[in-house]
Amino acid sequence: MFGSLPIDIAALVAAMYVLGPIAVHWTFRFAGHCQPNRLRLDELPTPIERLFRSKMSEIQELGFEMLGSYDCGALASNTRSYVAYFCDRRNNDFANISAVLTPRGAAGYIEFSTRFSNGQWIETNTNRVLPLTPANPDVRVFRFPGIRDARTLLHTHRQLLEKYAPGLWAQGEPRGEEIQRLVRVIENYGPRHVRIGYMHPAEDGQSYKLTWKGAFLMTWRGLWPVSMIRKWTERYVMHSELHALRTRDLTALQKA
């Protein structure tokens, strides 16, 4: 009765691994330019406004100045991106609440980031979505979706700075031009993926399309069982990192 079920499942998975990349190859686009449009909170779509308001006071209480809320446009296919941007000028740390609106609803996360004079970055966020392309070697990203409050996330970020960037000088941005830091990151996304063979400029000259290599590798990373293995691996690595930080804190307290 059930003899053909495993075969049917295997055939379905195989079809997804073959047909999925073809669909993604023809439909995926990423914007080549970003022109953030600053909006009042009450001008944002309701789900985005609610998300920003639920977290912005936590970040401001930590000494971060809110620089504005922005509509970053349709960066990827069938999405619209928004960000609330913050800066701590004393330490040259930046924070943001990033959100994406899709036909299925809104999702977002908090992030703290620090850029150093040697070109390296450290980012600490609550994003549970793993990237489908290789990481930027200049950016070290730590994802802790289990951390629920901004204060704990910032404390973790500062611990990571002490561990991985001791003595490095954090760089800020000219006053009034802070959002350009985010623009540079977004506008470097396409060219970086061209360099590694995942994308190529689209015919319109304003966006990027996936190469076949990019389409297959990105799709496969997002499909079961690869996606499950990647999540387990990431969860283990981040759990180990948090455990090491707590042990480091405890050792410091014992020595004090």
Image (cartoon, rainbow, N blue to C red):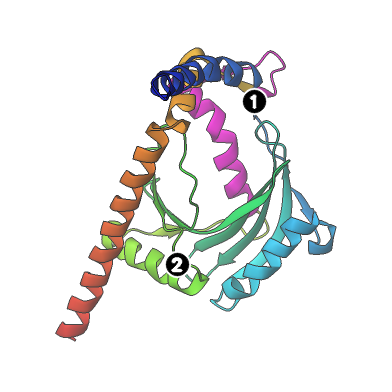
Closer-to-camera residue (233/17): 17
Q: Residue 29 got which mark? A: 1
Which residue position is annotated with label 2?
A: 153
Q: Residue furthest left?
A: 255
Q: Which residue extends farthest bottom?
A: 256
Q: Quadrant of the N terminus?
A: top left
Q: Where residue 61 appears, x then y in whole percent?
A: 58, 79
The amino acid type found where label 2 is placed reads: Leu
For the C terminus, which image quadrant?
bottom left
* Depth check, front residue: 253 or 45: 45
Please, what secondary structure does the residue beneath circle 2 have?
Answer: helix
The boundaries of the magenta stretch are: 178-207
Closer-to-camera residue (196/28): 28
| Above or below, comparing residue 223 to residue 115 in the picture | above
Three-letter amino acid code at the position of disc 1: Arg
Q: CA distance from mark 1 to mark 2?
A: 32 Å
**Taking the image as drawn, is residue 166 in sight?**
no
Question: Vertically, is 222 above or below 68?
Answer: above
